[in-house]
Image: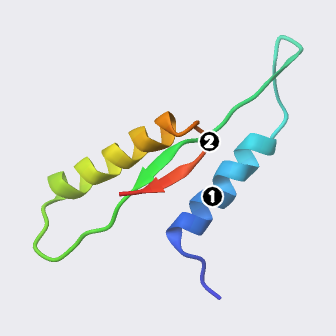
């Protein structure tokens, strides 16, 4: 079964969250927020980018460490 891009990004997000990062001997929590979008018919790359960017900021406002679709 093929995973959709959102599932792949969520797997990456989870892996980053669970990775034991350390800086100067102290644990540092790292998370990933992402916004994704797809091309609709007759859309420009600027329109798709704008939706993905808005989705990214929704993810950040929604508590971070999440993937949003725009």
- Crowding around mark 1 (Cα neighbors within 10 Å: few <14, some 14 to 19, many 20+) is some
Find residue 55 and report its horizontal and vertical position in percent: 38, 48
Frontmost residue, 32 versus 22 = 32
Identify the element where label 1 is drawn: helix
Identify the residue at the far front of this view.
62
- Along the horizontal axis of the image, is 65 left or right of 57? right
User: Mark 1 highlights which residue?
Assistant: 10
Find residue 53 and report its horizontal and vertical position in percent: 33, 44
User: Which residue: 68% across, 60% down?
Assistant: 11
Find residue 32 and report its horizontal and vertical position in percent: 60, 41
| Mark 2 or 1, nearer chain start | 1
Identify the residue at the far bottom of this view.
1
Please identify the quadrant where the N terminus is shown.
bottom right
User: Mark 2 highlights which residue?
Assistant: 65
User: Which residue: 60% across, 67% down?
Assistant: 7
Please identify the quadrant where the C terminus is shown.
bottom left
């Amino acid at each position: 079964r093929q995973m959709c891009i959102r599932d792949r990004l969520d797997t990456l997000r989870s892996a980053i969250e669970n990775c034991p990062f350390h800086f100067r001997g102290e644990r540092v929590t790292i998370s990933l927020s992402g916004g994704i979008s797809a091309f609709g018919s007759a859309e420009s790359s600027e329109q798709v980018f704008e939706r993905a960017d808005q989705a990214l900021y929704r993810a950040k406002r929604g508590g971070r460490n999440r993937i949003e679709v725009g």
